[in-house]
Image: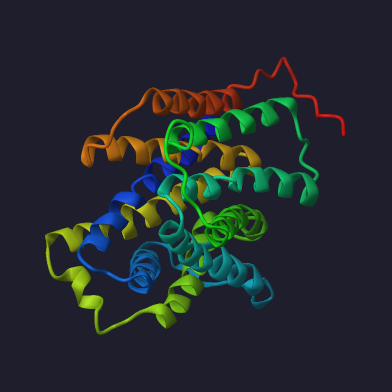
Amino acid sequence: MKKYLSYIYVILSAVCWGFIGFSNRMLTEVGVSLGNRVFIRNFGTLLILTIVFALFHRQVFRIKLKHLPIFLCSGLLSILTLSLVYFQCQTMCSLSVAAVLLYLAPSFVVIFSAVLWKTPLTKRKLIALVVSLLGCVMVSGIIGGDMTASWAGIGLGVLSGLCYASYTVFAHYGLAHYESYTMIYWTFLVAGLGSVFFADFETLPLAFSGTQGIVGVCGVVIVATVLPYIFYTKGLEGVESGRASIITNIEPVVETLVGVFVFKEALTVWTVLGMACVFGCVILLANGDKKCEEKPVKS
């Protein structure tokens, strides 16, 4: 039961992350700049986590100085840099291309896991990886849609995938010494403070000037950041990192459904097939039969 609960946590994290596009669109439409969106997301999350943990879970504030580099890396690279390069990538490429490049992350995680922790590269995992990537391409609209990208944009997109994947790596090391909530708090402490340098405080009130901006702020901070990172880090306690990262490919499916039902975007045959591939990948990973042990792929 605990195993399946961990999978549920990872799936919930992907569902919540799927609302980041909706939240960002709300903020962009009211004129909130890139730097301020990054600041709102990271610093807002830091404020909420600080209040919640100060009231209910104060032990997260204590870490050993020798472990600080783990949180510096996860905060600056996995959160702050990811926000900056991914949002910029979306301005230089079509949204479909940006999304697919971001979701190269599971490929990087599988490679990192095999190299750093000697995690077996199984046939089941390889099949799931290929199927999930194919699903992402279909859902994004690259197949049967438009693909526009510059080389600089593609480079930023690949970098966003690396940054996204790096959180799983740093969380692996952090969770060896601390509980999941400590990992989350110190990561966002670093990211939140770092994002101050990108904020434009003169134009920041735009985000709070109307209902749409407030909805965007609540969405990007609570729904698309606080909840998913708690769920995902909690899920990593019971799900191997490579599998967890592949399962989060549910996120573009959620973003597609939000686009269809909220923004009235078209639902194509390719989109439906892509969603089926992504969900099939999750089922393939979560329902491995113990009687049929996965055999590592020979290299």
Q: Is residue 96 above or below residue 55?
A: above
Residue at 36%, 79% in the rendered image = 199
Residue at 44%, 31% in the rendered image = 144
Residue 177: image x %, image y %? 65, 60
Q: Residue furthest left?
A: 210
Relative depth, front residue between 181 and 79: 79
Indicate the quadrant where residue 225 lies: bottom left
Left or right, 68 with respect to 272, comes to right
Can I make out residue 5 in this image?
no
Relative depth, front residue between 197 and 2: 197
Q: Residue furthest top?
A: 291
Left or right, 181 with respect to 107, comes to left
Left or right, 194 with respect to 202, comes to right
Indicate the quadrant where residue 66 lies: bottom right
Q: Is residue 216 above or below residue 278?
A: below
Q: Is residue 229 above or below residue 135?
A: below
Residue 297: image x %, image y %? 81, 29
Residue 173: image x %, image y %? 67, 58
Residue at 49%, 68% in the rendered image = 80
Residue at 87%, 34% in the rendered image = 299
Left or right, 274 with respect to 291, comes to left
